[in-house]
Amino acid sequence: MIGSEPTTEVAPARIGRKRWLVATGVLLVSTGLALLVGSVSIDPVGIGRALLDRIPFVDVSSGLSDVETRLLFEIRLPRVVMGGLVGAVLAVAGAGYQGVFRNPLADPYLLGVAAGAGLGATLIIGIGAGSVLVPPIAFLGGMVAVGSTYLLSRTVGGRTTTSLILAGVAVAAFATAVQTYLLQRSYDTLREVYSWILGRLVTVGWGEVLTLAAYASVALTALVLLRRLLDVLGLGDEEASALGVEVLKVRRAVVVSATLATAAAVSVSGLIGFVGIIVPHTIRLITGWSYRVIIPLSLVYGAAFLILADLGARTLVAPAELPIGVVTAALGAPFFLVVLRNMRGSS
Amino acid sequence: MRRIAILAALLIALGACATSEGGSTTTGGPTTEPAEATTTAGPTTTADTGFPVTVSDGVNEVTLATRPESIVSLSSTATEMLFAVGAGEQVVAVDEFSTVPDGAPVTDLSGFTPNLEAILGYEPDLVVISFDPGDLQAGLAAVDVPSLLLPTATDLEDSYRQLEVIGAATGHVGEAAEVVANMQSDIEAILASATPAEGVTFYHEVDPTFYSATSASFIGQMYGLLGMVNIADEADDGTGFPQLSSEYIVSQDPNIIFLADVDFGVAPESLAERPGWDGMTAVQNQAIVGLDSYLASNWGPSVVDLLETIADSAAEMAPAS
């Protein structure tokens, strides 16, 4: 048996209307909350009116001061949108890797993709090339990393769950070692990489949002379209081939899309852990194993999760900031354990 | 053996400086005696010797049997202090970031990731550091090399104390007292003429992700001496260096922005490009001051220059009241 994923379980292949409503509701509430609350308090009614005012042909006076308006539209809003995009991307990429490797533990971090992308980004920032080059080179680094992980696991330990993860850990450790070496060699130029490593949404503006949106829309569309084929892959290579699926092509497409998404997210927001494993897993525990359900829901809940995590990072010690990676780990791990426990109790 | 031979040679060469006043000890605490050592104008080196000497860096006591003649400094502030008290000729190697003064023997030794063997390669008889990653002092002690750990000063008094410790450990007690006295009078002069800075609000940027420094930090206290108001104080997290949010900085709208990260690629002009920052008063008035990264991170005699830079900027850029 390859991996530990049950393939025969009957799972709903479609997302019911109720699930969609709940997911959309959660995302809307998270977004609203994140817009209303911040390290600086702004009149909530004013925020509501200011948002309405932005809708074409609607003209209401918000009553907000000039500073508050700038704060809302140039700092808080792009940060919330960015949090949502990064969360959606990391969660869907995690789900994609899990499907393609038929491995419930696959995740952009455990596979070494994030570390590889980080190494690529460090190199580009280090030589001072323009920031336009950061995402493509990060993507290259991520592809090399995931490729190495896959080959290592095949040659060393057969095709077990653990060998893939062990190979990923080794690749990540190697990439991190090279990155640390580079950082130590040129402390001056790479100082900004240090704070970037810890994950940063603090400096985000609309420019970064647009960069990520461009890459993410391509990658996420591809992954959403491929979700049916991921379910077929779950039947095993032979069965999938028998059903007329070009297994290798599908695999490549999923890995390339997921890596592109991860690399773009890593390029703009730094290393934010835990999202890619927790969100798809929680959804899987609740809804079952079909990727037709997991992928779209991961997109929505991943966005909501990171928006809320960033809300915590911004407000818990306001006006100071907490590193977002600390929040995702602190929120994510216990939440995941609770879900895991409840599911075992009920089944 | 070779080390002893070199030491002996140095001692003979510097015979004039060798012990002449017996073996009484001087501690690193505030010194009152040096007045007699400097009755004549100008520093004297011969009057200060009194080895063996026991000095305390605040944590450990170190006894130096003879005047150290091959000092390794892994702290840029310690290097500046060593040269300021007249012990420059006794220094054989300093770390990569010890850029002041010009003549300091810079090597590729690192103060952040110190390598014990590389340090011992210079055959030091005293090592001064500002940071011990864990086992550096223990390693030096194991091979009987005395070391002083002088971390970032907590306040000006601590900075003066470190100068006196360095003076006592190197046989320059009188000059150290003189350096301290000069610093004190310079600082007093700056404070006496810097009244316009009172109540001026500011944001001190440590790095482009909005890490700042509160009044609990050494650099924060320099602004505090001038009566300036630090917007980071609201966010004190116990470290002295909290990360602020962009929202908070913009809403506080400080009078002046001090950038301690200009040497790391943050141009003052680029602040207008930060989301939401273009409307800030300091950005519109161009009340943005780039601080030399060396000045912004040291606590030696050059704090006088730092304080002067801050006071001048505040006088120039403070809002007319």
Image: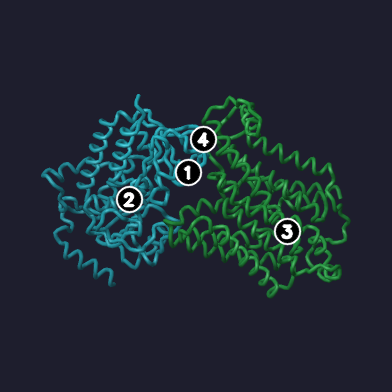
Chain colours: A green, B cyan
Residue toward you, A227 or B119:
A227
User: What's the residue type where badge 4 is placed?
Assistant: Tyr
What residue is pinned by disc 2?
B77
User: What residue is disc 4 on?
Assistant: B248
Looking at the image, can residue A329 be seen? Answer: no
Q: Chain of mark 1?
A: B
The answer to whether the residue labelled 4 contacts the one labelled 2, judged by CB atoms less than 8 Å apart, is: no
Q: How many numbered marks, from 0 up?
A: 4
Chain of the residue under label 4: B
Q: Position of residue A36 (x, y in %)?
A: 63, 33
Q: Secondary structure at mark 2?
A: helix
Q: Is residue B268 above or below residue B146?
A: above
| Residue B99 in the image: above or below residue A82 | below
**Residue B106 in view of the camera:** yes
* Residue pointed to by mark 1: B273
CB-based contact (under 8 Å), mark 2 and mark 1 = no
The Cα atoms of the two marked residues, 3 and 4, are separated by 38 Å
Relative to A258, does residue A69 appear above or below in the rendering?
A: above
Where disc 1 sits, the SS reads helix
Q: Is residue B117 above or below residue A42?
A: below
* Label pair 3/4, CB-CB below 8 angstroms: no
